[in-house]
Amino acid sequence: MQRSADLNLILWRRSPGQSFPMAGSRKFVAGLVACALLCSLLALWLPLQVSVITVFLFAGPHNWFELRYFLLRLPLRFGRSRAFFLTAFGGIAFLTLTYVSLPLIYNFKLWSGDWSIPIAIWNSFLLLWLGVLARLRGKLKPHTDWSWAIPLALLAVGVNWLEPELFSLAIVYVHPLIALWFLDRHLRRVRPEWLTVYRRCLCLLPMVIGGMCWQLSATPSLPDDNGLFWRITQHAGAELLPNISSHLLVSVHLFLEMLHYAVWLVALPLIGGAGRVWDVKTVPLARHPLGFPQLIKSLLIVGVFLTGLLWLGFSVDYSTTRDVYFTVAIAHVLAEAPFLLRMI
């Protein structure tokens, strides 16, 4: 019995400062539960005020961390993945430019017809791009048939044309959850012993959201000042869903956004497997002799500069900066798709 215990200690030995797997998983679960409860309480208590503070503090930094994480996952040479990455980068550029053009078309009254049509067209391009990406990714995986991706994308396009604005709103609520999927894939790589307990914790998420909906279902809508707070409620879908309390919509969306920021700013950097945050040499594209160290360093420095510029913009004119940010930030939303597919 003693020899067995000694063997277990040897098998699970960690370097100084690291805990044993069981203790580490318990801390991980405690952190997940504490974060979810804190985020839900803040979202219930002061949704508008916390939304303003959260976007101000974390919108820029989380984009920087996403950029660094994607650079870590980018291969030095595309090889057989060339078609996949060319389609990915081409789609990101095209969809970002067309998305940014939509507010310009609206403001300059370049479209006089039903505004839902341009939205439906953009959504259709997005869905078809995702379908093609999934199909290309399936071809790179041995013994895998992802031929269903294109028919599924076409089906989603048809559903989108029924209610394009609601379809776009669904993307707003689904996007924060993608970070939880990234965390799942990252745990599978660097902390597989935590993966089961993490997925069990995810089962609590519908219960938390359901509890928030039950708590706020009968509450009056949030005050409409036709300014900053109005922008927040509209972003959460208050205009499209007038029969649902805007308090509920803003609180649920804020809760999901805070989880999104927590994953990118806290969970992924602390779990490990990504190297020191400020060390450019931990990025394979910068470390390899055939890599691009100066380019990677420049990208990260520009990211820091843009984060500071975003903070300055929020300080001078929060409402306008928020509008510009959530329009341009579609690029990082789109970039998540190909990198997530590569991790599946």
Image: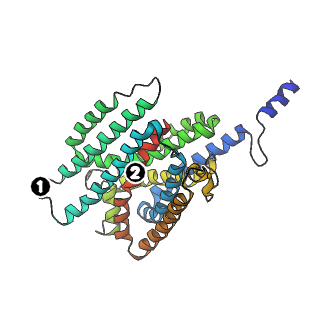
Residue 240 in the image, given as x and y percentages of width and height = 25, 52
Residue 113 numbered tag: 1
Residue 57 appears in the rendering: no
Residue 219 in the image, given as x and y percentages of width and height = 36, 54
Residue at image point 43% right, 60% down: 47
Q: Amino acid at mark 2?
A: Val
Q: Is residue 24 left or right of residue 96?
A: right
Which is nearer the N-term, disc 1 or disc 2? 1
Residue at image point 20% right, 42% down: 161
239 vs 22, nearest the viewer: 22
Residue 291 in the image, given as x and y percentages of width and height = 55, 51
Q: Is residue 218 left or right of residue 239?
A: right
Residue 187 appears in the rendering: yes
Residue at image point 22% right, 44% down: 163
Q: Is residue 222 above or below residue 127?
A: below
Name, please, the residue furthest toward the left: 112
Q: Is residue 325 above or below residue 243?
A: below
Dot 2 alpha-carbon crowd within 10 angstroms: few under 14, some 14 to 19, many 20 or more: some
Q: Is residue 23 left or right of residue 116?
A: right
Residue 89 numbered tag: none
Residue at image point 46% right, 23% down: 143
Residue 166 in the image, given as x and y percentages of width and height = 27, 47
Residue carrying label 2: 333
Q: Is residue 245 above or below residue 302?
A: above
120 vs 341, nearest the viewer: 341
Q: Which structural element holds mark 2? A: helix
Q: Which structural element holds mark 1? A: loop
136 vs 341, nearest the viewer: 136
Q: Amino acid at mark 1?
A: Gly
Q: Could you give the CA–CA distance between mark 1 and mark 2, rounded to whole angstroms? A: 28 Å
**Quarter of the image where the N terminus is located:** top right
Name, please, the residue furthest toward the front: 290
